[in-house]
Amino acid sequence: MPDLQPLTSAEQEFVQEHAQADPAKLLLQQHRFKGLEVPRLVHYIQARQKVKNKLPLWHQNLQIIYPPVLSLEQSSSEITARYKANLGRGRVLIDLTGGLGIDSFYFAQQFAQVHYVEQNPELTAIARHNATVLGATNMQFHAGLATDFLKNFTGKADCIYLDPARRGSANQKLHFLSDCEPDVLQLLPLLFQKADHVLLKTSPMLDIEQARQQLGQVSSIIVVAVDNECKEVLYLLDKNAPPEPDYKAVNLHASKEEATLKFKKTEEETATITYSEPQAFIYEPNTAILKAGGFKSVAHQYHVNKLHRNSHLYTSETLLPEFPGRVFSCQAVCKYQKKAILPYLAAKKANITVRNFPDSVAAIRKKLGLPEGGDQYLFATTDVHQKPIILVCEKVIPAT
């Protein structure tokens, strides 16, 4: 079992004093710190460094216990856990893959009772301790297999949540539902015996359409990004799901309102959009929209033109600051030639993005002789006339 002893005042002082220290150097110097169990404290410091931005509530509390680093890397962030918790409310929720307990803790803010289930007894003990430290009194902890817990659970939950493990015996990443543990496809009948609603979290690498067809009874598919980095895909499963699920692309921010695009697949397929040459402003949708496949829907809903069927870049003559993604002013449209592009780059460096273009970023940098950086952005893409072009741009507002 893990060491669940809280840090003493001397240990807390050491952790705070060396909060930014190099853990490897501290281990080499451990002979200097008499009376302290330095390897244990170094693990604590290393863990806090990893969770500082991901789990700020955990980071600021020195009574928290941390598991091995891999479990920290696999856990949800606070911002995504809060978002998931707000998707539903009710009396009872079961978290079948409890892990470090981040999701369970935030579900406990919305549900009267949360059952945390985890097959790893050490993680269970850590999660129980941390929940107590953080004041979550409506959580029950169960160390055991998810299937065993469900079979023995005699009540009825409002919702069951699970985040199947996505790593195999060789620690490789897995991207198919059937390769995950527990196997949600095999478990579905039992899940719906115990609850009418199921919330499933999967890797962003999983093929969304394949998963939707395999799961069935999907009422909503939510792609979640944080600061324009795609983090997870959620499937809301309901006994009485409609014939066609909603798709939602959500980009979360710690300091401002989330950006959301909602559509149905039939709407995406039938949306009427327009194409044009680059105009005054260029728009790049956030990663959640690109993963969800809302290429036409974002153009239709925000009344922007698409540069090319396969480019997924958009343009307009007037500024749309509410566009859910990065927004740029277009300074020049150039041929893919060094002599055509360099006159527009005052600092002789640029950030480069490729969208539907024959060359890679590395190949473009080599051809143009451009280092990375600066305030200017080059978009290498294909225009409506099927010609390769380079857009010289500057960002005008932060990504949303």
Image (cartoon, rainbow, N blue to C red):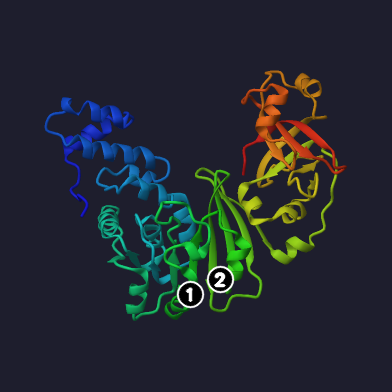
Name the mark on residue 188.
Answer: 1
Residue at point 65% right, 26% down?
Answer: 375
Residue at point 62% right, 37% down?
Answer: 398
Question: How far apart, in angstroms, are the residues tagged by discs 1 and 2?
Answer: 8 Å
Relative to 175, is 319 on the left or the right?
Answer: right
Decide: is 276 above or below 125: above
Decide which of 352, 176 is in the foreground and name it: 176
Q: How many marks?
A: 2
Name the mark on residue 79.
Answer: none
Image coordinates for residue 220, horizontal then vertical, percent: 59, 66
Name the mark on residue 215.
Answer: 2
Say whether marks 1 and 2 touch (CB < 8 Å). Answer: yes
Image coordinates for residue 347, horizontal then vertical, percent: 67, 18
Crowding around mark 2 (Cα neighbors within 10 Å: few <14, some 14 to 19, many 20+) is some
- Tell me the element at label 2: helix
The C terminus sits in image quarter: top right
Image coordinates for residue 211, horizontal then vertical, percent: 58, 65
The N terminus sits in image quarter: bottom left
Decide which of 260, 54 is in the foreground and name it: 54
Decide: is 305 above or below 218: above
Residue at point 69% right, 55% down?
Answer: 294
Q: Earlier in the sequence, mark 1 or mark 2?
A: 1
Identify the residue at the far front of this view.
170
Q: Amino acid at mark 2?
A: Leu
